[in-house]
Image (spheres, rainbow, N blue to C red):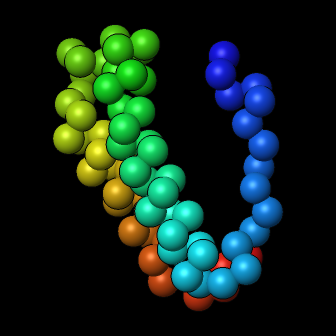
Amino acid sequence: MAFRGVKVPPNSLSLEEARKRTFDFFRNACRSIPTVMEIYNLYDVTTVSQLRSAIASQIRQNESITNPK
């Protein structure tokens, strides 16, 4: 699997950096959705739009956090 070489980055130093990293994560996750759907054959179960909305709602649950660490 491609995730073996993935390293966990350090915590964000500021809210701006955390916000940028969150948007980058969201963008990368949304771009990966079609590949994930194909690998796991999810087209009969859900749609790209539904998965994108689910990711966005999970991110929005943490929007009130003010400590970037």
Please give the name of the residue rendered at 51% of the width and 63% of the height, measured from the top-left corner: 22
Quadrant of the rendering where the C terminus is positioned: bottom right
Residue 63, how many percent across, how many down? 45, 77
**Whole-percent x, y for residue 67 in the image:** 66, 85
Residue for point 39% across, 68% down: 60
How many numbered callouts? 0
Q: Is residue 65 visible?
A: no
Give the x, y percent position of residue 51.
Answer: 30, 40
Which quadrant would the N terminus be assigned to in this image? Answer: top right
Location of residue 25 in the rendering, given as x and y in whole percent from the top left corner? 50, 53
10 to 1, vertically: above or below: below
69 to the left or right of 32: right
Rendered view: 31 above or below 59: above
Q: Is residue 69 above or below residue 42?
A: below
Q: Quadrant of residue 52?
A: top left
Which residue does the image show at 32% across and 26% down from the upper left?
A: 34
Q: Residue at x 41, y 23 (%)?
A: 36
Q: Is residue 50 above or below residue 21?
A: above
Q: In the depicted view, which residue is nearer to us: 7 or 63?
A: 7
Camera sees residue 66: yes
